[in-house]
Image (tube, rainbow, N blue to C red):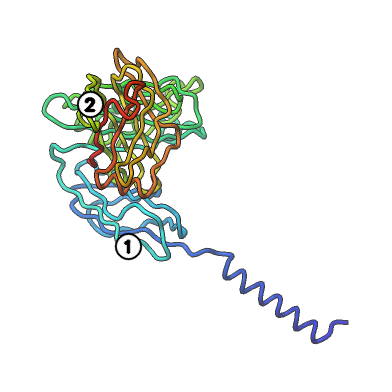
Amino acid sequence: MTTARGSLAGAVAVATAIVLASCHGTEATYSIGGNLSGTTGPVVLKLNGANDIGMSGDGTFKFDQKLLTNDTFNVQIADPADRCAVANGAGVVGKSNITNVTITCAAQVLQTVIRTANLSGATETPLPVTTTASGAGGVVVVPNVTQMPMTGGVTFTGLTPIEANIHLAPSGNPAGSGAAIVPLILAADGFTAVVPPGTTLDAALLGPLLRGELYFNVTTAANPNGEIRGAIELQGGVAASVAVLDQTQVVPPSGSAAVGVGTLLANRATGKIIISYITHTVASASGADIHTSAGLGSAIVAFTNLQTGVTAGTNLANPPAGATMTTQNLSDFDHNLLYFNVASGAKPNGEIRGNIAPQ
């Protein structure tokens, strides 16, 4: 027999469960949006590398996907005609909608070109490849009227590469297949491929680069035509720099004749390093890293992979797969407080060094 007291207790329990479910069963989500200006044609906006919004020109935007508190967000743009800057586009979601992402575009002039890519099997052609592998990459190119210095590369996971290259798609058809134009050097870690030292891009390829017609492609034994691919087209959302290393930037100067070039591209939202490496001529490198000069100064990203003879007289150093930078590291980057460093047995504190200046 059920008493009135028992019925009341049961009702209270049910009501409490309903209240708890309403409080904790569904977390609040928030949208990401803002304003786009200065475009001269159709563009595509991406949130965290996907969730595309196609826009025919300037205007406000808001992504359909909503994120939870503490999720990271990174807004980027693929604009084949303009040079774009993204403000307030990378960070961590709080407890309100993000409405102040500002993307400002203008005509591309002879300025440093920074483009990144997300690689997957879904973009392989003529047929998508079913794979769990993925990758990310980017390039930094300095335009001029003849040959354009280029650095960059790609990192990947979930596959064993045979080779990795930058390809040129057919003109006007970025999704099509084309010939390899820059063979990349596979690093010893098996997860990184980099643009060879001293590489220049013919000036005639600046237009295709800006139009997103250059792409990374990584081949494997199972997929010799490519297992993952990504158009080199995204602007914004990265911390990028290319630095020349020499003995004059060491304190005190080391007197070494060695030189080097360091490249860094990192995701501003997550801090994950997209691609970073140093090519150098230090004869017997004992270590390499990214240092900060903030505070007492310290190494913040150790380049644990030291590879000799990747090309004649040139060595390669790169960090382990998955290396990241902290929020403080990215702040130091913005304040010109980071530098590349290569040490040797004779110069354990640094034989050559190069300041990392935002580009």
Quick check: 324 left or right of 242?
A: right
Residue 278, given in percent of the width and then of the height, sits at 32, 27
Residue under numbered circle 2? 247
Count every numbered label the image shows and give the total.
2
* Category of crowding for the residue at label 2, using alpha-carbon neighbours closer than 10 angstroms: few (below 14), some (14–19), many (at least 20): many
Residue 246, given in percent of the width and then of the height, sits at 22, 26
Q: Nearer the viewer, residue 285 or 133?
A: 285
Picture layout, residue 7 above or below residue 137: below
Q: Which mark is residue 12?
A: none
For the residues labelled 2 and 1, say whether their Cβ atoms are less than 8 Å apart. Answer: no
Name the residue type under label 1. Thr
Taking the spot 30% from the left edge, 17% from the top edge, the residue there is 314
Residue 144, given in percent of the width and then of the height, sits at 13, 30
Q: Nearer the viewer, residue 250 or 31?
A: 250
Under tag 2, what secondary structure? helix
Residue under numbered circle 1? 99
Label 2 vs 1, first from the N-terminus: 1
Under tag 1, what secondary structure? strand
- Does the image show residue 286? yes
Taking the spot 45% from the left edge, 54% from the top edge, the residue there is 71
- Which residue reaches farthest bottom? 4
Quick check: 9 left or right of 150?
A: right
Residue 276, given in percent of the width and then of the height, sits at 34, 33
Q: Quadrant of residue 58?
A: bottom left
* Category of crowding for the residue at label 1, using alpha-carbon neighbours closer than 10 angstroms: few (below 14), some (14–19), many (at least 20): some
Name the residue type under label 2. Gln
Picture layout, residue 93 above or below residue 46: below
Q: Nearer the viewer, residue 217 or 72?
A: 72
